[in-house]
């Protein structure tokens, strides 16, 4: 469950930047959102690999 909490924390940390980008058109916030989404993708991929390894053993 620790990995699930990592994803939740990452998403929650991006909430303010999403608001700044979409509501206030802050370009720097958009950069942070893109970086955060890339981190989310990488974390998700790690979790997928971990789940597959556990499943196959």
Image: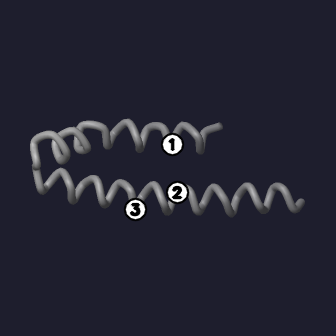
Q: Nearer the viewer, mark 1 or mark 3?
A: 3
How many angstroms separate mark 1 from mark 3 (CA)?
Answer: 14 Å
State left or right for residue 30 relative to residue 43: left
How many angstroms separate mark 2 from mark 3 (CA)?
Answer: 9 Å
Which image quarter: residue 12? top left
Which image quarter: residue 57? bottom right
* Cβ atoms at labels 2 and 1 below 8 Å apart: yes
Q: Position of residue 35 (x, y in %)?
A: 31, 60
The numbered mark at residue 43 is 2
Residue positioned 13% across, 55% down in the render = 28
Instruction: From this view, report whether residue 49 is shown above or below residue 22.
Output: below
Is 9 or 23 nearer to us in this picture?
A: 23
Q: Position of residue 7 (x, y in %)?
A: 50, 44
Tag 3 or tag 1, which sits nearer the N-term? 1
Dot 1 falls on a residue whose secondary structure is helix
Residue marked by disc 1: 6
Residue positioned 10% across, 49% down in the render = 26
State left or right for residue 1 relative to residue 22: right
Dot 2 falls on a residue whose secondary structure is helix
Residue marked by disc 3: 38
Instruction: From this view, report whether residue 52 is shown above or below residue 22.
Output: below
Residue positioned 87% across, 62% down in the render = 56
Q: Callout 1 environment at 10 Å: few (<14), some (14 to 19), or many (20+)?
A: few
């Amino acid at each position: 469950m620790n990995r699930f909490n990592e994803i939740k924390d990452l998403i929650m940390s991006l909430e303010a930047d999403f608001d700044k980008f979409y509501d206030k058109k802050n370009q720097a916030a958009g950069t942070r959102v893109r970086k955060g989404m890339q981190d989310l993708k990488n974390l998700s991929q790690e979790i997928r690999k971990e789940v597959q390894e556990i499943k196959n053993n």
